[in-house]
Amino acid sequence: MRKKILFVINTMGRAGAETALLELLKYLESPEYEISLYVIMGQGEMIGKLPSCVRLRNRKFDEHSVLSRQGKWGMMRTVCGAFFKNGGQIKKLRNIRKSFMSMEKSGRRQPDKLLWRMLSDGSERFEEKFDLAVAWLEGASAYYVADHVKADKKCAFIHIDYESAGYTREMDLNCWDAFDRIFMVSQEVKEHFLAVYPEYADKAGIFHNLVDQEGIRRRSKERGGFSDGYEGMRLLTVGRLNFQKAYDIAIDAMKILKDRGCKVRWYVLGEGDQRKELEKKIAALRLKEDFVLLGAVDNPYPYYARTDIYIHATRFEGKSIAIQEAQTLGCAVIASDCNGNREQIEHGKDGLLCRLTPEGIAESVQILLGDEEKRKELGLAAGRKNMEQKHELKKLTELLG
């Protein structure tokens, strides 16, 4: 009899965790498994890339990005519906209040995390029992699998620095007790999760992202990439326009580079809730032609292949898919010296780590701008890294017994 596996994720937007999930699902395609996916928000443009072997369990699904106008309306409908679905409105309000108080205490207000518990409690329920249920992300998907899924075994994945991302015990309400295994995408992610939950050390393990390096190299040769005819040096960053990615600091770094007379242009692939705020800052510093927000694209790899330096200057990370893609394509990489990034880069050997300040970023960029041999050396070392990690699958499938 085929083993039933259910994966649960918050959305299917264009981001690293979603990309990693799609890659894992491709490797799991087998007559041995009956694979299902449930998306808490029932929304996201990446759903079209779901492998044919996977059954989508949402009754309705909105393929608009959660960042588009239509997507935002869809999100509002989902949130309102979740408040009334399955009853328990008083309990839901109490949980929202508890999460809010926890955020106030920590000094970080994050509206999305405020509603994760309510969305979990207001999501669809399945009567059938699964052999394995997988919460692919923190927040709603973890709460949902813990509280509302029937399964012989349950496991969860943590993709971010748990402390820096703003999760707390008050939000989680002991959800991790329900899981047989908790996988982290890197050693640093594991350490930071266990700093909050030391009692789960026996359950914690590491499961590296599966990266299709040959597929990335193949797609990098497709048509696309830069089309503005710019003749100077190009910098590239790929990632959502949000607080974590620290574009506010990157823009200040670009201002320093321009004031120093560097002939360089910085491009960003990605969308996010900070676009308007970043556009205002770009305009105020007169950088409209120098710091270019290109939006999200279906195939970013031709851009990686044609950039001179890839920059990933973020406030915190779990394990960056974007850095792995850049390294696969032999880019010279500069990344901020923060949780997650420092585990992916050996400073001076296959990339540079820098201080997360405008001056720190600008100085590292100038070092590589003026040293073509160093750029080539870093890129070649990065391109030699083997990230396939297919053996990681056994860590998941062995839970099936």
Image: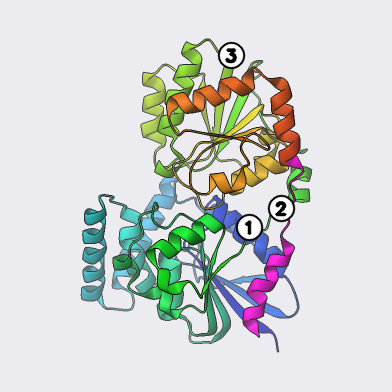
- Residue located beneath label 2 in the image: 387
Residue closer to the observer: 192 or 304? 192
Q: Of the residues under marks 1 and 3, which one precedes in the sequence? A: 1
- Residue located beneath label 1 in the image: 209
Residue closer to the observer: 9 or 237? 237
- Residue located beneath label 3 in the image: 263
Identify whether 261 is placed above or below 108.
above
Q: Which residues are magenta?
A: 383-401
Disc 1 and disc 3: Cα gap in Å?
36 Å
Q: Position of residue 364 (x, y in %)?
A: 55, 26
Q: Position of residue 77 (x, y in %)?
A: 35, 60
Q: Of the residues under marks 3 and 2, which one precedes in the sequence? A: 3
Residue 325: name its quadrant.
top right
Regarding residue 218, the answer to whether it shows in the image is yes
Residues under numbered marks 1 and 3 in contact, where contact means CB atoms less than 8 Å apart: no
Identify whether 248 is placed above or below 345.
above
Residue at the spot 65% in from the left edge and 70% down from the top edge: 54
Disc 3 and disc 2: Cα gap in Å?
34 Å
156 displayed left or right of 244:
right
Residues under numbered marks 2 and 1 in contact, where contact means CB atoms less than 8 Å apart: yes
Q: Amino acid at mark 1?
A: Asn
Q: Amino acid at mark 2?
A: Met
Residue closer to the observer: 161 or 224? 161
Residue 148: name its quadrant.
bottom left
Residue closer to the observer: 39 or 334? 334
- Crowding at dot 1, Cα within 10 Å, few <14 / some 14-19 / many 20+, comes out as many
Q: Position of residue 3 (x, y in %)?
A: 66, 83
